[in-house]
């Protein structure tokens, strides 16, 4: 089984690499930090997996596409997990978020996922099988006042995955859209504010893997927070806005 995971040098991506690592598994691990990526790869090899790693930014479409094409030619990909993501937010007290900050999040979180998945879809469809998992966020269900760019990128990714799932299914390609809540990671460490129902990263990775293996179309967790975000979106906008404005947090610069 050949599995490609982006954002594999830390956080959920690293945890997913570890839970998928096993004999007879080939992992294509993509990340931006060479030292951390090498450490994750070493752990996966110790678990019996064959690993090919690539230090790449998913926003660099041409380089990523070339690497994916070569990897798929050598190891036909059965599962791709588009997990790479970044977070940021507006300057405290500002009326909005700087365009550069929003654009970078969209480039990585949304377009980076498209850059990861799109090159692999034709081969998967030709083989009549394959699985795609897109790691969005519960923030995809309702924009949060203090992270507009992040929420926009994840909402776009969720919509992309929902559309892709319906489009690709007749060709044998299954798509799972994952919307997790808070889990322990370097990204969460930069979050200043409440983190309700925070989950251990390894537990989150196991939950994602289980959902993919069961062929679930959507994986949302924790369910209480997922329900709350959906209800917030369903409320009249004036009430929803008041709720999210009262959920104060700040995302420190990386």
Image (cartoon, helix red, strand yellow):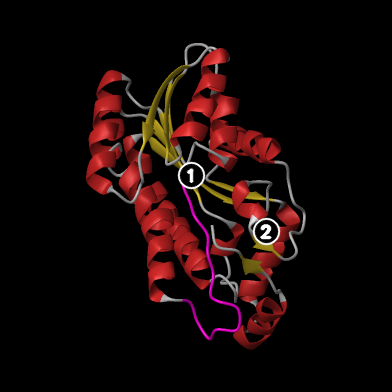
Task: Based on the picture, tell me whether residue 243 belongs to the magenta stretch.
Answer: no
Q: Is residue 87 left or right of residue 100?
A: right
Q: CA distance from mark 2 to mark 1?
A: 19 Å
- Look at the picture and state if 220 lies above or below 200: below
Q: Where does the image place residue 213, in percent across and percent down from the top left?
A: 56, 30
- In the rendered structure, which segment of residues is drawn in magenta? 83-97
Front: mark 2 or 1: 1
Which residue is disc 1 drawn over?
83
Q: Residue at x 36, y 51 (%)?
A: 112
Residue 91, picture quadrant: bottom right
Count residues near mark 2 (Cα–Cα under 10 Å), then give few for <14, some for 14-19, many for 20+: some
State how many labels appear. 2
- Look at the picture and state if 38 lies above or below 173: above
Q: Is residue 123 visible?
A: yes
Q: Where does the image place residue 238, in percent across and percent down from the top left?
A: 63, 88
Q: Residue at x 58, y 70 (%)?
A: 142
Along the line of sight, the residue nearer the viewer: 83 or 188: 188
Which residue is disc 2 drawn over?
226
- Look at the picture and state if 239 lies above or below 1: below
Residue 190, picture quadrant: bottom right
Mark nearer the N terminus (2 vs 1): 1
Count residues near mark 1 (Cα–Cα under 10 Å), then give few for <14, some for 14-19, many for 20+: many
Task: Based on the picture, tell me whether residue 93 belongs to the magenta stretch.
Answer: yes
Q: Secondary structure at mark 2?
A: helix
Along the line of sight, the residue nearer the viewer: 233 or 134: 134
Along the line of sight, the residue nearer the viewer: 81 or 173: 81
Q: Residue at x 36, y 58 (%)?
A: 107
Q: Where does the image place residue 172, in percent across and percent down from the top left?
A: 36, 34
Q: Is residue 181 visible?
A: no
Quarter of the image for the C terminus: give it.
Answer: bottom right
Name the residue at the front extreme. 35
């Amino acid at each position: 089984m050949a599995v490609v995971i982006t954002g594999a040098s830390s956080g959920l991506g690293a945890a997913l690499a570890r839970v998928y690592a096993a004999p007879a598994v080939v992992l294509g691990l993509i990340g931006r930090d060479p030292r951390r990526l090498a450490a994750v790869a070493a752990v996966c090899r110790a678990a019996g997996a064959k690993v090919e790693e690539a230090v790449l930014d998913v926003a660099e479409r041409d380089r990523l596409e070339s690497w994916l094409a070569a990897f798929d030619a050598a190891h036909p990909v059965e599962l791709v997990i588009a997990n790479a993501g970044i977070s940021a937010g507006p300057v405290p007290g500002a009326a909005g978020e700087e365009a550069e900050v929003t654009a970078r999040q969209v480039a990585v979180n949304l377009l980076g996922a498209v850059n990861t998945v799109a090159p692999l879809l034709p081969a998967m469809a030709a083989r009549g099988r394959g699985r795609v998992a897109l790691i969005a966020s519960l923030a995809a269900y309702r924009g949060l006042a203090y992270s507009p760019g992040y929420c926009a990128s994840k909402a776009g990714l969720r919509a992309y995955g929902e559309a892709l799932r319906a489009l690709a299914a007749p060709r044998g390609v299954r798509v799972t859209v994952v919307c997790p809540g808070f889990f322990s990671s370097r990204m969460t460490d930069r979050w200043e504010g409440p983190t309700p129902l925070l989950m251990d990263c390894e537990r989150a990775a196991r939950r994602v893997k289980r959902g993919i293996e069961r062929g679930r179309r959507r994986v949302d967790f924790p369910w209480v927070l997922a329900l709350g975000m959906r209800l917030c979106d369903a409320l009249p906008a004036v009430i929803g806005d008041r709720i999210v404005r009262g959920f104060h947090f700040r995302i420190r610069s990386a």
